[in-house]
């Protein structure tokens, strides 16, 4: 019995992240796209040892909450490599992160709040704006979005503030892109957008965050990896144009690329039973351990098959995780993998063929390095959690 198996028997249910794999994926990006500034998408996996490992490779952080800014800071990432982009930032959020990151305004009203904060502090600060551009990921016309400021609204807005200077843009239209042609066309459109925004009064573009993180392969049988070298060539062409033009810093978000395949969810089989001829493997913490497989099965139950279109970050594809029994490879059987919650929806996989497993065996679920442990409505992106109170007559 090797050390990893012993560790799993002592610690399952648990997530295990492979440090070497994380470093390898970081270096893949650095080698294919030299000269780029990379931001690790903290919401994909904010586990501190993972965050520190990525930071040690020179990556900054794309943060989606005030708490994520503080987590990135604690991981040792300098303030000038932390970018805070999220809708609905409150005055309390802005106060919490002031001076600790570059704030990306998500609305015109947020720009007004930033001006208000800076005026009170008698400071002049540099900020970015998230733009909802006049194009889609496929180059078609703009669509309505909860994120960012419409490009046309920016063109007509007063962007000259006494205490703010707009120095960059952030664009993010869709994640998990594996088609290099689509991604390269999108990058070209983003650069032309930056040129247009730079012409507005009150704006001096110093950085372009292209957003829409690098896609990762979930199913090696049906998906092809993103051609990183082709993407890198397009970015080098844009950098040459940028050298004689905006001279802006190019920023790319890693998305889930550096951590997704590096993580595995392990859970213990606590029971096996047969009902009406069907075999069930009951595991600890199924839906309440790794939500994404349960979401996939929930969607299949409702539409009759796995949907072709992803619903990120909850669902990517029907084969988004592979299942195996640690240490078993014989006497295959068809089973349902279910959890111990008191709901029939607590299902990780239906009618899946696996080696025969006994109570006490360990189930391994792949592609758990991103959007795994913290993908719950209360934990996702480290937002503030609601409080609970009991109101009585004595409170009147």
Image (spheres, helix red, strand yellow):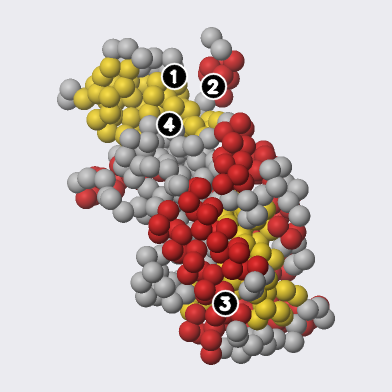
Answer yes or no: do the residues labelled 4 and 3 have beta carbons within 8 Å?
no
> Camera-side residue: 179 or 64?
179
Mark 1 or mark 3, earlier in chain: 3
Residue occupying the point 19% across, 46% down: 304
Q: Which mark is residue 326?
A: 1
Mark 4 or mark 3, earlier in chain: 3
Q: Is residue 365 visible?
A: yes
Total labels: the figure holds: 4
- At label 1, counting other C-alpha atoms closer than 10 Å, the crowd grade (few under 14, some 14-19, many 20 or more) is some
Q: Secondary structure at mark 2?
A: helix
Residue occupying the point 26% across, 19% down: 333
Q: Secondary structure at mark 3?
A: helix
Q: Which mark is residue 8?
A: 2
Residue occupying the point 58% across, 51% down: 33
Residue beneath disc 4: 365
Instruction: Residue lying at the far left in this picture: please name it.
Output: 276
Is residue 130 positioned above or below 286 on the image?
A: below
Q: Which mark is residue 195?
A: 3
Mark 1 or mark 4, earlier in chain: 1
Real-space CA distance between mark 1 and mark 4, rounded to the nearest whole angstrom: 10 Å
Q: Is residue 47 visible?
A: no
Real-space CA distance between mark 2 and mark 1, rounded to the nearest whole angstrom: 10 Å
User: Residue 274 occupies which quadrant of the picture?
Assistant: top left
């Amino acid at each position: 019995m090797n050390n990893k198996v012993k560790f799993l028997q002592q610690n399952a249910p648990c997530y295990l992240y492979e440090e070497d794999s994380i470093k390898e994926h970081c270096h893949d990006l650095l080698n294919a796209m030299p000269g780029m500034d990379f931001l690790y998408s903290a919401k994909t996996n904010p586990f501190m040892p993972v965050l520190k490992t990525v930071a040690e490779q020179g990556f900054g952080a794309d943060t989606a909450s005030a708490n994520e800014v503080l987590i990135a800071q604690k991981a040792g990432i300098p303030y000038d490599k932390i970018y805070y982009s999220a809708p609905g930032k409150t005055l309390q959020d802005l106060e919490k992160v002031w001076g600790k990151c570059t704030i990306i305004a998500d609305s015109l009203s947020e720009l007004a709040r930033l001006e208000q904060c800076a005026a009170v502090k008698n400071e002049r600060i540099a900020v970015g704006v998230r733009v909802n551009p006049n194009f889609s990921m496929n180059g078609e016309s703009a669509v309505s979005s909860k994120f960012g400021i419409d490009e046309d609204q920016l063109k007509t807005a007063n962007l000259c503030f006494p205490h703010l200077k707009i120095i960059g843009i952030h664009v993010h239209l869709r994640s998990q892109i594996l088609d290099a042609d689509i991604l390269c066309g999108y990058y070209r459109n983003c650069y032309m957008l930056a040129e247009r925004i730079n012409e507005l009064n009150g704006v001096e573009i110093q950085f372009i965050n292209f957003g829409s993180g690098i896609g990762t392969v979930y199913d090696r049988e049906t998906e092809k990896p993103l051609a990183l070298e082709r993407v890198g060539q397009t970015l080098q062409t844009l950098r040459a144009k940028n050298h004689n033009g905006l001279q802006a810093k190019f920023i790319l978000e890693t998305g889930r690329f550096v951590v997704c395949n590096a993580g595995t969810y392990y859970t213990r089989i606590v029971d096996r039973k047969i009902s009406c001829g069907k075999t069930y493997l009951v595991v600890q913490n199924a839906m309440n351990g790794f939500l994404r497989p349960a979401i996939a099965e929930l969607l299949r139950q409702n539409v009759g098959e796995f949907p072709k279109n992803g619903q990120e970050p909850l669902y990517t594809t029907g084969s988004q995780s592979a299942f195996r029994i640690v240490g078993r490879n014989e006497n295959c059987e068809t089973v349902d993998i279910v959890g111990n919650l008191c709901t029939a929806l607590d299902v990780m996989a239906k009618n899946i063929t696996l080696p025969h497993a006994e109570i006490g065996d360990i189930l391994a679920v792949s592609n758990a390095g991103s959007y795994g442990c913290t993908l719950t409505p209360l934990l996702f992106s480290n937002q503030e959690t609601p409080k609970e109170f009991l109101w009585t007559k004595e409170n009147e």
